Amino acid sequence: MQNNVLILDFGSQYTQLIARRVRELNIYCEIHPYNKIPEDISQFKAVILSGSPFSVRGEQAPHPDLSKIRKKVPLLAVCYGAQYLAHFNGGKVEASEIREYGRANLSVIKAEEALFENIAENSQVWMSHSDTIKELPENGVRLASTSDVLNAAYRIEGEETFAIQFHPEVYHSTDGKQLLENFLVNIAKVEQEWTPEAFVEMTVADLQEQIKDDKVVLGLSGGVDSTVAAVLLHRAIGKNLYCIFVNNGLLRKDEFESVLDQYKHMGLNVKGVDASARFLDALAGISDPEGKRKAIGKTFIDVFDDEAHRIQDVKYLAQGTIYPDVIESISVNGPSATIKSHHNVGGLPDYMKLKVVEPLRMLFKDEVRRVGAELEIDKELLGRHPFPGPGLAIRILGDITAEKVRVIQEVDAIFINGLREWGLYDKVWQAGAILLPVNSVGVMGDERTYEKVVALRAVESTDGMTADWVNLPYDFLQKTSNTIINRVKGVNRVVYDISSKPPATIEWE
């Protein structure tokens, strides 16, 4: 990949948003932990330092060696990064008298500065820090201020190093995308070549070079990610791709049959494998969310291993892993803590002889959909809501039983079909139902009931890194609740989840 941008992650929850904004400029970027800087910096045309929950004045402050970056590659330091450059290079960082958090406006911008081209004074920015830069580093030149922050932005004379104390990546910084474009395109001269067409062309060529005439087995889920991965691989290696769609017993109602039917029309070589009993046995008695994920992941691997042995000379296992899966599954001392593990991230056990190929590993969800459109995959399939790899297992809080699966499948079907009937499905990024591990007192007819509670969840998002709950019509929620309680035996109460991500996650487990 040419014209890479390197983002060094100091643990900010906004780091992934920086990557998203860079990708929106049709520029490829990668996130690496601050303490794992790539050896070869020559492959990068620009570097961005992220924010951090740490203080540069603290003993635990991330402290990387930037000697092979400074004065060699254009550098933009955001928030903690800006304070880091000041604190360790002759400047002074102190605790703010008041915590500087929220909206602010650039009251002063130094004229004719490339970083602020096409950005006017009074532009709104988003602050999020408890320290502030009192004195600039050696050779520092102030570029912008707000009413409360004197050194809101600066550059270092004699090098292409820029620093800002606000976050350009968040929506509340109204000219944040313009600032990133000024830095990456105008200053660092990065070419805007990251397009779906270019990705398809490059990836197909790379897959052909990597796989050659070997055979690949791919686990299809029916979702967008695995489908796009399958079509990419099919374009690259044709008949040497063998697709397996596993019924893990945790799919949506009737999904196994409907997905197999859907793939018949796509020219893919797909085999359906019903392993539902095997998965339910593996999950018996397990209540811990991570335990369930690990049990499902191991069983997936075992099923694929069994099926792969039925294909002569297969060498690769393909997966639809995407970038948020990778980011959320990586944890180092400092950067973002692991939120949850993913069953399709982290490689294969030693006993399995297959090598992994992940053609979508560096894409965000919306990028996957754009690549799918470039591959001319049906719009309805590309518009399908994301569905978790572990399936309904993480939407059943507590242990898994066949009866609980039946209940949540029925509830989910009523909810999703209702969204379609009311014309709401395409206005929602992801929706589903959660079976809670509590019973609720109710009355049906003249009898007291003591049955399960289900929560409905619907969110809007671009890539799943952040999400807001959807304000569904009350009439729809009322009808859906009545239908569920009347039709699904074992449920007597329905609630609606109005939590956003962050602080909540989209799934409950």
Image: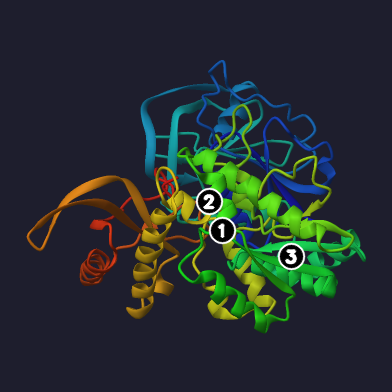
Q: Marks 2 and 1, Cα distance to the nearest angstrom?
A: 6 Å
Q: Residue 354's x, y, as percent?
A: 82, 51
Contact? badges 2 and 1 (CB < 8 Å): yes
Q: Which residue is mark 2?
A: 280
Q: Marks 3 and 1, Cα distance to the nearest angstrom?
A: 44 Å
Of 433 and 198, which appears nearest the observer? 433
Q: Image height check: is 407 above or below 13?
A: below
Q: Which residue is mark 1?
A: 276
Q: Which mark is residue 193?
A: 3
Camera sees residue 482? yes
Count of all numbered marks drawn on residues in the image: 3
Q: Image height check: is 98 above or below 269?
A: above
Q: Residues within 10 Å of mark 1 (few under 14, many from 20)?
A: some
Q: Residues within 10 Å of mark 3 (few under 14, many from 20)?
A: some
Report the side of 84 relative to 358 (left or right).
left
Task: Tell me which numbered mark, 3 or 1, is placed earlier along the sequence.
Answer: 3
